[in-house]
Amino acid sequence: MDPAQIKTTIVDVVNTSRILVQSMLNQDLQSQARRRRLRQRGDESDEDMDTEFSQTAGPCALEILMVMGQVLSIERRFWARETSTDWWDRIVLQVWDDSQWLRNFRMRKSTFFELCDLLSPALKRHNTKMRAALTVEKRVAIALWKLATPDSYRSVGNQFGVGKSTVGAAVMQVAKAIIKLLLRKVVTLGNVQVIVDGFAAMGFPNCGGAIDGTHIPILAPEHQGTQYINRKGYFSMVLQALVDHKGRFTNIHVGWPGRVHDARVFRSTTLFKRLQQGTYFPDQKITVGDVEMPVVILGDLAYPLMPWLMKPYTGSLDSSQELFNYRLSKCRMVVECAFGHLKVRWCTLLTRSDLRETNVPIVIA
């Protein structure tokens, strides 16, 4: 068949289809008019209803027209609502000074951008045909704002012009990036001699740190919820930390249920094993009386008394024991102050975390 005949055949088929569609439309109009008249007379029967349904149950005229390409496609709706980012782009980045950055993001602007540069390898995303990816700076800002304030996900999302699910994703992405790239570099022992000299100036010789645990409130877990109820009666997860003389974290361990005793948490850690083996601190001993004293850490009554862990005396005390307790408590207070600073700076640790049980330790760390 030559091209002219093919073209003629196609035109005939299209014209026939148009006639069929027009006929179906006319039948539909006639049927609707008939039903309207019957309804007005009030004598429409069940049989008429069934007949009417059987006549119109086939493919509708609009579907046939769309298959033939005779109906223009309807413009697709946007799958994401348009939001405003003016506050972040124009106010925060261009207007806010260091005091506003420190108050809202818990760090100065220069520190914020330094943090973004360090996390960029893990947080940078590529644009897609559907939308532009969030910048590393905005992703980090969303996470910091959520961790530093008691705001809801919806409130933070409205603040930054993103969806609440995006806020939750940003928090976890930034937390995981910090653990992957920065945690081991920041939470580290550092110069032991400087730490020992710092505690000596506070009144306790040859001390390498103070240790304690704190409870981070969480929602009731789905399984074994009673294991997370601490001695104060609420659901929590334990954060154990060793800090230096300035309250800087040198070792952390997080994840145990709130019901578990501090001593048990401590014995399960790598820190305990290394202290027991004598490999955590350098072999640096001093002589006290006739006893050689290694570098020690300080704990409260919940911790076991060890050659390298000092705790307060109990019971009836003489003056020298009271002086020992006073100096130990004065130096050990740095870890409690460190927990206080941590929770005031990152207010999400003061409220019950709504994260999944597996994600809570990541965000705490």
Image: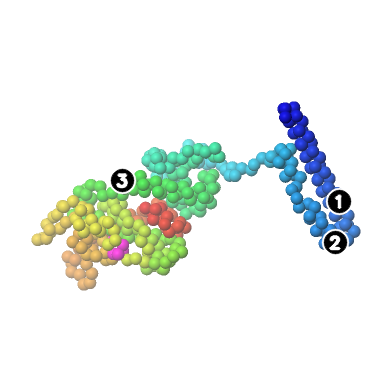
- Percent x, y of residue 365: 37, 53
Q: Do the residues labelled 1 and 3 touch (CB within 8 Å)?
A: no
Q: How crowded is mark 2: few (under 14 residues within 10 Å), some or many (20 or more)?
A: few
Amino acid at circle 3: Lys
Q: Which of 1 and 200 is in front in this view?
A: 1
Give the residue drawn at x 82%, y 56%. 51
Residue 204 visible in the current orientation? no
Label 1 vs 3, first from the N-terminus: 1
Give the alpha-carbon distance from disc 2 to disc 3, as whole Å: 83 Å
Q: In this rendering, would 330 be left or right of 30?
A: left
Residue 187 visible in the current orientation? yes
Dot 1 falls on a residue whose secondary structure is helix
* Residue assigned mark 2: 45
* Residue assigned mark 1: 33
- Percent x, y of residue 168: 48, 51
Q: Are marks 2 and 1 in contact (CB under 8 Å)?
A: no
Give the alpha-carbon distance from disc 1 to disc 3, as whole Å: 80 Å
Give above or below for 120 relative to 353. above
- Percent x, y of residue 336: 32, 58
- Residue 185, disc: 3
Dot 2 falls on a residue whose secondary structure is loop
